[in-house]
């Protein structure tokens, strides 16, 4: 083990007593090697465990010349420390510091009987020996887990409510017959877009138990894929039709009369979708 003789210096800080070492105040060990050159200190760090866990923190180790270096550190607990309690190591070699002891005073005033006040006890059945960062990370993980559980339960309840809402669209007619009836009524008005789309969405809602009015088209298709993966062809055709509805909404707000030929082709596509679904082709 290499060794160095060290002198202790307390940098002046405005408002603090000169040369008084208190908890949290920076202290500099100015050290000179005893018999050898200063090793490469870039890979050196504070050896643990310490006499008191987390009582010392080394901020920097800086080589000054070939046989001297400085260590900037802080003590986080009141008491008397020897420089040889601050051992630097690169994992193989160790560097021991020799010098006078350091008396670290508490920043909290002593009680009337001369004793240091008792530290606050933890409100939890755990100690605080671990670094604060670990407790912050643990709290973050716990809060994240609680949030994920809450989000999952909320999502389940939300979709359960959506399924309950499907009962509002029940009818003595079959989904196909209800669609055909609605389309015959729409035909008398030259197929208004909103009535055609509603008739189609009600059919899909009843036929496949999909919440066609509460979710966006993307979420409808995602919901369909998750709950009915076997209906891949149906989902693909449904996606095309929903995209065409969106296109027509951009062309005309109330009807499909802007292009008579396109309108007829689109209406036939809706009928074909329902017929193929009924026959089980899709």
Image (tube, grey):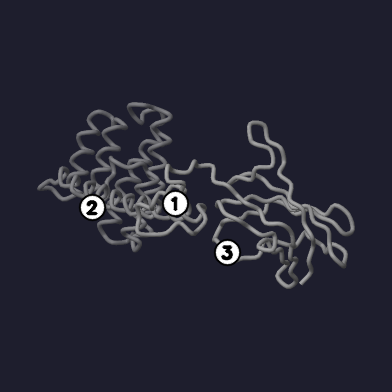
276 or 30: nearer the viewer = 30
Q: CA distance from mark 2 to mark 1?
A: 45 Å
Look at mark 1 in the image and give the residue it sits on: 140
Q: Residues within 10 Å of mark 2 (few under 14, many from 20)?
A: some
Q: Earlier in the sequence, mark 3 or mark 1?
A: 3
Is 16 situated above or below 148? above
- Quarter of the image where the N terminus is located: bottom right
Foreground pick, 10 / 187: 10
Q: CA distance from mark 3 to mark 1?
A: 30 Å
Residue at the outermost right position: 66
Per the image, the residue denoted by label 2 is 207
Q: Position of residue 80 (x, y in %)?
A: 60, 56
Where 9 falls versus 91 (above or below)?
above
Q: Disc 2 or 1, which lies upstream in sequence?
A: 1
At 26% from the left and 38% from the top, the residue drawn is 198
Element class at badge 1: helix
Residue 49: quarter of image: bottom right
Q: Residue at x 28, y 48 (%)?
A: 154
Label 2: state its secondary structure.
Answer: helix
Kindly report the distance in space between the C-alpha atoms of the residues bearing marks 2 and 3. 73 Å
Report the disc number at residue 51: 3
Circle 2/circle 3 CB separation < 8 Å? no
């Amino acid at each position: 083990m290499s060794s160095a003789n060290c002198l202790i210096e307390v940098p002046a800080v405005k408002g603090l007593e000169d040369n008084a070492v208190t908890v949290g105040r920076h202290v500099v060990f100015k050290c000179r090697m005893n018999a050898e050159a200063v090793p490469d200190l870039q890979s050196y760090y504070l050896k643990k465990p310490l006499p008191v866990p987390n009582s010392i923190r080394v901020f920097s180790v800086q080589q000054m010349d070939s046989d001297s270096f400085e260590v900037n550190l802080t003590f986080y607990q009141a008491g008397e420390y020897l420089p040889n309690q601050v051992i630097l190591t690169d994992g193989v070699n160790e560097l021991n510091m020799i010098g006078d002891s350091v008396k670290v005073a508490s920043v909290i005033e002593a009680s009337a009987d001369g004793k240091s006040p008792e530290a606050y006890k933890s409100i939890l059945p755990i100690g605080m020996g671990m670094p604060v960062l670990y407790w912050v990370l643990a709290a973050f993980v716990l809060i994240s887990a609680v949030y994920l559980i809450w989000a999952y339960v909320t999502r389940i309840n939300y979709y359960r409510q959506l399924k309950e809402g499907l009962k509002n669209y029940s009818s003595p007619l079959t989904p196909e017959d209800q669609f055909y009836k609605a389309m015959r009524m729409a035909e008398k008005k030259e197929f208004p877009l909103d009535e055609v789309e509603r008739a189609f969405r009600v059919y899909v809602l009843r036929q496949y138990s999909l919440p066609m009015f509460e979710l966006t088209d993307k979420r409808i298709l995602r919901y369909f894929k998750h709950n009915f993966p076997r209906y891949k062809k149906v989902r693909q055709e449904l996606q095309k039709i929903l995209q065409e509805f969106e296109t027509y909404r951009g062309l005309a707000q109330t009807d499909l009369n802007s292009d008579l030929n396109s309108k007829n082709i689109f209406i036939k596509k809706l009928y074909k979708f329902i017929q193929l679904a009924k026959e089980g082709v899709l």
